[in-house]
Image (tube, rainbow, N blue to C red):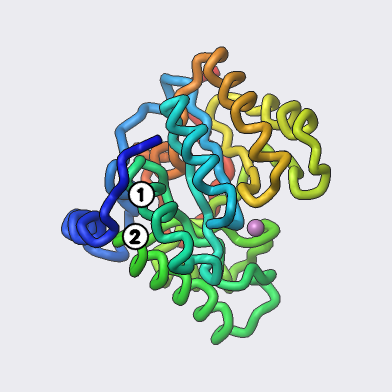
């Protein structure tokens, strides 16, 4: 649906745009817009556990609605097979975040393992896309002070969620849609791009938020004016609206 992107050209272009890294205040990634989520109705859809066989489909659906989202990818899934999808994520204005290398419970790891889980994933994402992630989604939302310290050291803000669709458990399109609809302005919605029934629900989820006049934002855009801080935890934008 979108024009093909030459990954090498893209990487060079994006690398040239990268700010100093890491910084105390995290800049939104390349292509990020300034959206005032205190005044407009924002929703941040997040897709975890990819890239995978449905990534292209999800990107097509988002493109059809002019919607941006955040993809929290698993390092070990970042392979040559998915190079085109990874390039598209960045080229089409989505955010790419770190979802660890092996998807472990980070709060149970040794310091060495923890460092490796985050660091290897940051590196491979940068190698494939030219973008260094600055957001981390801890698997299962499990984190602690040690994880926070390491995330801070590696320039990653911790992104949790407001609305959990529990899509991985139910495998039911109607239920996923119903849960996603509970989102209010400023919400972060947790979805999994690896679950077929979730992918099937995406067009209806988008139709719902379109009807409600939402602006689709990446997580960094959601917190734009507040600036994400490395190591800190975020679960929703608390603003003026409603
Ligand atoms: Ni996950």
Q: Residues within 10 Å of mark 2 (few under 14, many from 20)?
A: many
As displayed, is residue 33 above or below residue 104?
above
Task: Estimate how packed mark 1 is, as few (under 14), some (14 to 19) or many (20 or more) residues with alpha carbons within 10 Å.
Answer: many
Residue at 55% x, 18% y is 242
Residue 11 spot, x, y in % from top left = 25, 60
Q: In front here: 127 or 26?
A: 127
Horizontal side of residue 220 vs 201, given as left or right:
left
User: Is label 1 in a helix, a strand or a loop?
Assistant: helix
Task: Return the residue nearer the eye: 154 or 43.
Answer: 43
Farthest right residue in view: 170
Q: Which residue is mark 2?
A: 129
Residue 183, located in which quarter of the rendered image?
top right
Check if mark 1's residue and mark 2's residue have beta carbons within 8 Å: yes
- The answer as to whether callout 2 falls within 8 Å of ligand 1 is no
Left or right of 196 in this view: 93: left
Secondary structure beneath label 2: helix
Residue identifier under label 1: 90
On the image, which quarter does residue 218 sit in? top left
Counting from the top left corner in percent of width and height, residue 100 is at 55, 68
Q: Position of residue 215 (x, y in %)?
A: 45, 24
Quadrant of the rendered structure where residue 190 is?
Answer: top right
At 62% from the left and 27% from the top, the residue drawn is 205
């Amino acid at each position: 649906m979108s024009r093909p992107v030459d990954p090498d050209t893209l990487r060079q272009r994006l690398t040239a745009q990268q700010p100093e890294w890491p910084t105390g205040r995290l800049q939104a990634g390349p292509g990020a817009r300034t959206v005032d989520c205190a005044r407009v109705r924002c929703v941040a859809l997040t897709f975890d556990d990819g890239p995978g066989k449905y990534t292209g489909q999800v990107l097509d659906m988002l493109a059809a609605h002019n919607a941006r989202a955040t993809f929290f990818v698993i390092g070990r899934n970042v392979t040559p097979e998915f190079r085109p999808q990874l390039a598209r994520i960045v080229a089409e204005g989505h955010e790419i975040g770190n979802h660890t290398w092996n998807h472990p419970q980070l709060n149970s790891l040794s310091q060495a393992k923890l460092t490796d889980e985050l660091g290897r994933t940051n590196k491979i994402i940068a190698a494939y896309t030219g973008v260094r992630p600055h957001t981390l989604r801890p698997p299962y939302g499990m984190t602690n002070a040690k994880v926070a310290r390491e995330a801070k050291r590696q320039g990653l803000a911790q992104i949790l969620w407001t609305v959990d669709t529990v899509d991985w458990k139910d495998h039911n399109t109607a239920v996923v849609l119903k849960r996603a609809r509970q989102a209010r302005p400023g919400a972060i919605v947790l979805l999994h791009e690896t679950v077929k029934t979730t992918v099937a629900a995406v067009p209806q989820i988008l139709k719902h938020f379109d009807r409600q006049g939402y602006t689709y934002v990446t997580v960094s855009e959601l917190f734009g004016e507040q600036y994400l801080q490395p190591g800190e935890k975020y679960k929703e934008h608390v603003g003026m609206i409603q």
